[in-house]
Amino acid sequence: MHDIFVLAEHREGELREITLEILTLAGQLAEQSGGKVTAVLFGSGVDDYAGKCASFADRVLVVDDPMYENFNSAAYQQALALLIKTEKPHLVLIGNTGQGVDLAPSLAVELDVPYSSDIVALTLEGDKPVATRQYYGGKIEGRIEFKDADLYVLAIREASTPAGEGGKSGEIQKIDNPVTTEVTVRKFLEYVEAAIGEVDITQSTMLVSVGRGIREEKNMPMMEELAEALGADLSASRAVVDAGWLPTDRQVGISGKTVSPKLYLTVGISGAFQHVTGMKGADVVVAINKDPDAPIFQYADYGIVDDLFKVVPALTEKIKEMKG
Amino acid sequence: MNVVVCVKQVPDTSDPDTEVHIDSSGKGVDESKFSFVINDADNYAVEEAILLKEDQGGEVTIVNIGPEAANQVVRMALAKGGDQAIRLDDEKFAFSDITATARLLSSAMGDLEFDIVMTGCISSDDGYSAVGVTLAQMLDLPHAAMVKSVEVIGEGKLKVGRELEGGLMEMLEIETPCVLTIQTGTNEPRYASFKGIRAASKKEIKVMDLAATGLSDDQVGEAGSTAVMVGYSVPVVGELAEILEGDAGETSAKLSGILKEKGLV
Ligand SMILES: Cc1cc2nc3c(=O)[nH]c(=O)nc-3n(C[C@@H](O)[C@H](O)[C@H](O)COP(=O)(O)OP(=O)(O)OC[C@H]3O[C@@H](n4cnc5c(N)ncnc54)[C@H](O)[C@@H]3O)c2cc1C
Ligand SMILES: Cc1cc2nc3c(=O)[nH]c(=O)nc-3n(C[C@H](O)[C@H](O)[C@H](O)COP(=O)(O)OP(=O)(O)OC[C@H]3O[C@@H](n4cnc5c(N)ncnc54)[C@H](O)[C@@H]3O)c2cc1C
């Protein structure tokens, strides 16, 4: 059997895009191996999601129970482990997301099968998966091979395979909840939305985005001056927000905001995947970074490889002159 | 409230001079010019543990797998308020994957009494985001990953917030003992005081080799791993940015010219 299980991910009334991305990847692998793709969907009142998954899968297994209205990895793990033991798929693919990283590693240990995570490319060589992942903030890649097993659990990075068109019409099977007793070690309470601040950077047309490269909070005024000269708002990488140099609502990236300015000028930002995910809608991207190997240059239109402490003051002067 | 914190020593990737070059084996990188620091997320985990200790009493134990040079980050965690430390060190631990790493950490927990084990939610070099949750299952404990807030709400109960995409917080209740993987930005890590540093230099760091862990050869290192990293490569990248050449005066003149041309200034 070469069946591939894909865990569907949803939250607050939405099927998350990662589900369709991984179903697309699974479809590509299944075509190669001759296996079938099964989407596994836990939820409460999720017919709509089941329909969406069906157009990307050969089969959708639906467990509809109030227990799964909101994600709880303890409940998900029990249910998935039981399903996997009866269905015996060859691969289980899960998003390397806030939900996935809370579930997939412990599931693999419970099943006693190989696991790897944050995979950016996945192929099959014969029966076995071979994974590519990134190291050192994306500066190098590594090839992961697995020891022989009947099953592999793999967590796939978001946006690494674009979602396809779908077009299948998988069979939707509703099954009984395999978990029969209430899960008590861990209970979902509520979601709390990120607070909204003074400046909404998702609406900004010009952004100067600050990274850890500025080193100290005392260098923020230099950045403010550049932003002011350009008529831009300030945004930041997570590192800067973590350090408390700018408020959380200025953070661009996967756990922050997605922005789409006309100009996105990064200063001292390395270009981690979690950051660049949030800036892909920008028109013109400029990067100032001293390290020529910084991944940010892969995403920028224009780059300056130099010490930001030299470039930023010079650039601020030039812009001021130009504006007169 | 006894807390165990796992800390990893990593190269300082925020340093623009940290160049990453694959070594001649193809399975490692040249570390000779690296400067090493505590993993970013672990710095927040240490602080969170010390805050809990200050609030609730108890002890903080620091656990590391690493060479003697990693004593540096272990001592710093002790200087900030850690009470004792264990460092696992044996040639045979090299090339451990997530599972073997977590197995090693769990072997150090055997004799410890704790309410919470904390790890970072991700390491800044290897970036698997998996060791803490793997460890939890090996210890047969509940867990929560990507935790950004921890509150004690009663005997054997915590309320924690997990940070998800878009900054959304998932609040949940979890029983102790448990494993939490701590996200960056959770608190404001303190600096160690001189008094703390002096005290830490006298604290013992217990070193455990393979024999001391009670594990066998085939449970650690590559033999104990199921996901083997067989070779590094330089990624094939698409088109790079157009790099503006010259000194700061020249590059900033070129850039402002481009911005003007595009109607952005
Ligand atoms: C020479 C070499 C060879 C390697 N070969 C392989 C391989 O074949 N396969 C493979 O999968 N990986 C390999 N690795 C990487 C591997 O050792 C990872 O460090 C390990 O898989 C854990 O992943 P992570 O550090 O990304 O942890 P994450 O899952 O990102 O978790 C991070 C957290 O776990 C804890 N933690 C992690 N490591 C330690 C530590 N050393 N001490 C204390 N706490 C720790 C910390 O709290 C940390 O914040 C190799 C590394 C080296 C240096
Ligand atoms: C679950 C999760 C969610 C995340 N969400 C986000 C997110 O939403 N947004 C986000 O940004 N990150 C996010 N991250 C963190 C992300 O992985 C990176 O750690 C972060 O983006 C790094 O920020 P940085 O680029 O400012 O710092 P670093 O990666 O440390 O880079 C600093 C850069 O500054 C350069 N530099 C240093 N000195 C100078 C100088 N004098 N002149 C010029 N350049 C210099 C260096 O070369 C380096 O490239 C998340 C991580 C996780 C695990």
Image (spheres, coloured by chain):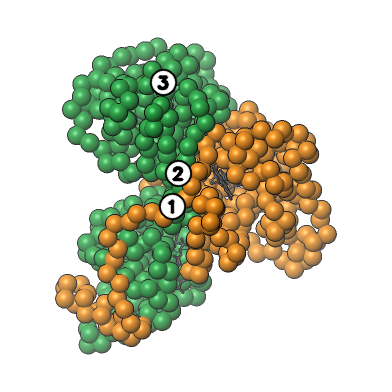
- In the image, taking residue A275 as reference, residue B95 lies left or right, namely right
The N terminus of chain B lies in quadrant: top right
- The image position of residue B258, as x and y in percent, is 21, 76
| Separation of residues labelled 2 and 1 (CA atoms) | 8 Å
Residue A143 shows which numbered tag? Answer: 2
Q: Is residue A161 visible?
A: yes
Asked if the residues shown at circle 2 and circle 1 are in contact, with their CB atoms under 8 angstroms apart, the answer is yes
Rendered residue at 37%/32% (across/down): A124
- The image position of residue A263, as x and y in percent, is 25, 66
**Colour displayed for chain A in the image of the structure:** green
Q: Which chain is orange?
A: B
Q: Is residue A192 above or below residue B186?
A: above
- In the image, taking residue A125 as reference, residue B116 lies left or right, namely right
The C terminus of chain B lies in quadrant: bottom left
- The image position of residue A306, as x and y in percent, is 40, 76
Report the chain holding disc 2.
A
Q: Count numbered badges in the picture.
A: 3
Provide the residue designation for mark 1. Answer: B233
Kind of residue indicated by mark 2: Arg
Secondary-structure class at tag 3: loop
Q: Is residue A39 visible?
A: no
